[in-house]
Amino acid sequence: MLERLLRDSAIYSLAALLSRAIGLTLLPVYAFALDPAQFGAFDLVTTLGVLVALVVPLEVSQGLGRLYSEGDAKRRQGLVNSAWWFTVVMLAAFVMASNLLAPQIASGLLGSPETTGTVEVAAGYIALNGLFFLAQMQLRWSMRSGRYLAVNFLYSMAMIVMSVLAVVLFHSGLPGLLAAQSLATALGVTGCIVGSGGISIGLSFDRRLLAEMLRYSTPLVPSGVASFAMLYFNRLALAHFGSLSDVAIYGVANRFGSMITLLIVGIQGALMPLVYSHYRSPETPRQIARLFAGFSALAMTACLALTVATPFLVRTFAGTRYLASVPLVALLSPALLLSQMYIFAPGIAIAKKTYTQLTIVGISGAVSVSANIVLVPPMGSMGAAIATLVSSATMFVLWAYVSQRHYPVPFAWPALGISSTGFIAALVGSQLAEHHLRSSWAALLTGALLTIAFLVVLTRSRLVNLRDVKTVGLLLLSARTLRR
């Protein structure tokens, strides 16, 4: 079982890497072929797609995953059929409603009634992405990780090729880009269905099985909406209080900042199953603390290096008109990591405190909404980035505090405090250098020196020693330490 867990975690990590690679590969296409307003509109559409995928199908895919392993093949087929037809009907209703209200949505969301056609195409794009998510989950629940990776690879290639053809060669603008990506997504859905192997989508529909799935999944919707508010409400605030160009600036920064989350993808897949298996061992809390210390050291170093390199990356992949996104990455990269680092505090999950989890996520979402409403009007995209950092930090702190009450982990708080102080100082120094030094090379050199200084602080704080730094292999380290 453990070997399969590690293999599948590695496969899903590679699939996540492909997803990030699409964003980075297509960034120059979006940045150079679309104007900032169109880029902002595209980012807003994809953001709303996340919300639609959560709310409209009522998270039925989670109910399918929870019940799929129970019962015989006939029951599994009934679950798949019912989940699929419910999702198709709900998303079709969403498309019809969006088309009926397209002029109002175009005026209210995209700022012009002339974008009505874009809204109509975007509705189909969002619906297809909702189906693709369900199709991917079906491959995961049926434990077909190899086919999951193969489909994601083909989907990634189709997405890149079709997007380039639509925007660069045919100059079809945002509607053409959405249509091309809709076609690529439809191919992805088809690939998932073909690759499901033995589980087809039949015409039968069982209301009892659907009700059983929805009883499990519907209570998860509020938590999903709160998570959405924590990480995505910023785009809606920028579109309302600012402009679509502000959304584009934030979108560029978020794409670069999200690169840092590749550090945690593998651990996310492997850590909790291993903790569930070994949490009664007296060694496990110490091993988790050691893993957290090593990961924190690596994460702070990577965030600092990414921040220093961001001006070069933005100029290369997005162009000079998006240079306003550079200072945002310094805030978003640690924010996006903090939003995922709750896995190192497993007490809430071990104690099965689902309502506590919902409360913490809800508070963090409320903080995000409030902070965006307060900060975005006077500060624009910088205010949105600060709001994201504040809400992510709120979630991590609350989660760690409550989890420690249920399952104490001996974190090295003094060493973490010293290292974090050094990290913040180096981060601020690199931003001041980028802002005040006229030469970009001088700013880059200053940032590199500050990174070296931080590494000295890191080793002097004794958060980790040199041997630990060399052995932090993310997923491999989590697996090996918890397996002992």
Image (cartoon, rainbow, N blue to C red):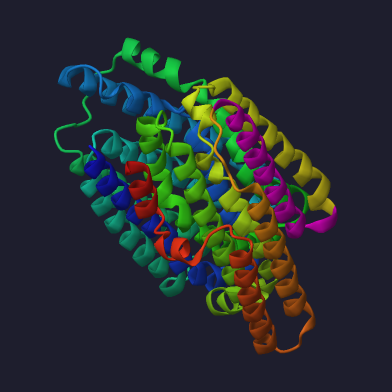
**Furthest-top residue in this view:** 208
Locate residue 348, reporting x and y percent. 54, 28
Instruction: Using the image as rendered, state which of residue 285 and residue 63 is in the foreground.
Output: 285
Q: Which residues are magenta?
A: 378-406
Q: Quadrant of the C terminus?
A: top left
Q: Residue at x 32, y 60 (%)?
A: 158
For the stretch drawn in magenta, the main secondary structure is: helix
Q: Position of residue 165 (x, y in %)?
A: 38, 69
The residue positioned 45% from the left and 22% from the top of the image is 217
User: Where in the figure is residue 308, as x and y percent of width and height?
Assistant: 62, 74
* Tally of marks: 0
Residue 355, placed above or below residue 465: above
Which quadrant of the figure contains the N terminus? top left
Of the pair 457 and 5, the residue shown nearer to us: 457
Q: Is 392 colored magenta in this rendering?
A: yes
Within the image, what quadrant is residue 31 found in? bottom right
Residue 427: image location, x then y, percent? 69, 67
Residue at the extreme right of the image, as rendered:
378
Asked which quadrant contains residue 319, the reply is bottom right
Q: Tell me, yes or no, if residue 241 can be seen here.
A: yes
In the image, residue 382 sits, relative to residue 216, either above or below, namely below
